[in-house]
Amino acid sequence: MIIGVPKESYPGERRVALVPAVLPTLTKAGFEVHIQSGAGIEAGYPDSQYSEKGAKIVADRTAVFAVADILAQVLCYGANDITGKQDVPLYRRDQILVGFLRPFGAPDVAQEISRTGVTAFSVELMPRTTRAQSMDALSSMATVAGYKAVLVAADSHPRIFPMLTTAAGTVTPARVFVIGCGVAGLQAIATARRLGAVISAYDVRPAAKEQVQSLGGRFIELPIEAKDAQDARGYARAQDEDFYRRQRELLGKTVQENDVVITTAVIPGKKAPILVTEEMVKGMAPGSVIVDLAAERGGNCDITEAGKTVVKHGVTVIGPINPASGVPYHASMMYARNITSFLTHLIKDQKLNLNLEDEIVRETLVARGGEIVNARVREFFTLPALAK
Ligand code: NAD
């Protein structure tokens, strides 16, 4: 089977779906890789490194789509809502598509993809289980995003992060507050700690407390309890507006005591809750920085504008889009390992093994044979359930 890797086309995207290091594993499993010329260059992987590992370099994007049995992309149409639509006429019936598809994004986009007849797998839907851990691209990208958020914050902040004792006096360490301690939040805590900041952190899931403490952060406990804070998959459950209002009231003081706030609080398939209001921002010290990793999902801060840096009340509010793309070498490496692990699980002896008893297959398969076949996606868009 031929895996085709087109160059990513989302504006500013620097990642690539496969890196040269995974090619021996794929070749051993019987795959051939055809990659568009220049696809890896912005991530630090020139064509020569791919061809040395046996990949075929293809000059033209259309030719990659035409030859591929499997298309490996980072941002497929759906997740790529700017240029992704141009790929739709290139899809072929029964061609396998693997990548970020943003399956809960827009029903018409999901339908448009499914109507082409592609067999589409969305990496966002990978189950959060030990068995699927090596295929979990969402966690890989969240890890990179959490790391990058701290560097962006440190770069925008007028203070030094670590404590310094110098002949010119002592510099006190920066105080960083992380809201939302999932994969990205925990990596932000670890990174800010490495830079010498003093960390506090909060999450609605009580299970996060121990993880924050093990990274040397202070866990902020609020005197409110979320109803069923965590679902069976480990994600936070949405709370009512009254809960979020109480959260904002109680978080205000902590936000204002910190120099940097990094927010990552999201609920799958929902708009991110507002946890930092403009009033709270007004109370922060001039020069403070907020990096809102929930920006693409509506943002955790009132002031956030996705893809922009806004300075208001003396506070810099950064709403990064696609932050993992800002560290493309390692983001691509991690993504490529996830995809390789997924493809070698999915395809045995060069045959697609569509075993729907396997939750890895069942949960990630979005479209097949012209229809949206994923139960969660159908339910989300209130489409009638498919007959078994
Ligand atoms: P996420 O990106 O869905 O959300 C980020 C964080 O925001 C979560 O920790 C969530 O609890 C928090 N949050 C949501 N609403 C909030 C609010 N109102 N106030 C404060 N915090 C709020 O989360 P994620 O990074 O995908 O991780 C979700 C869970 O899945 C975590 O428990 C993580 O450890 C777990 N996980 C497990 C595996 C695995 O077992 N293989 C892999 C990845 C993640």
Image (cartoon, grey):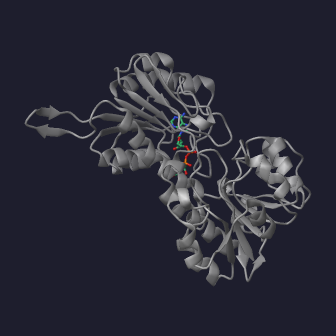
Name the residue furthest left: 167
Name the residue furthest front: 59
Q: Residue at x 43, y 26 (%)?
A: 316
Q: Residue at x 34, y 51 (%)?
A: 214
Q: Position of residue 56 (x, y in %)?
A: 66, 74
Q: Is residue 118 left or right of residue 298?
A: right
Q: Is residue 54 left or right of residue 260?
A: right
Q: Taking 29 as reference, is 105 above or below it?
A: above
Q: Position of residue 185 (x, y in %)?
A: 46, 44
Q: Is residue 158 or residue 111 the one in the foreground? A: 158
Quarter the N terminus occupies: bottom right
Q: Position of residue 325 (x, y in %)?
A: 54, 50
Q: Is residue 292 left or right of residue 384?
A: left
Q: Residue at x 10, y 33 (%)?
A: 168
Q: Position of residue 280 (x, y in %)?
A: 44, 19
Can the viewer see residue 331 in this picture?
no
Q: Which of the 4 image quadrants contains residue 175?
A: top left
Q: Which of the 4 image quadrants contains residue 116?
A: bottom right
Q: Residue at x 64, y 58 (%)?
A: 127
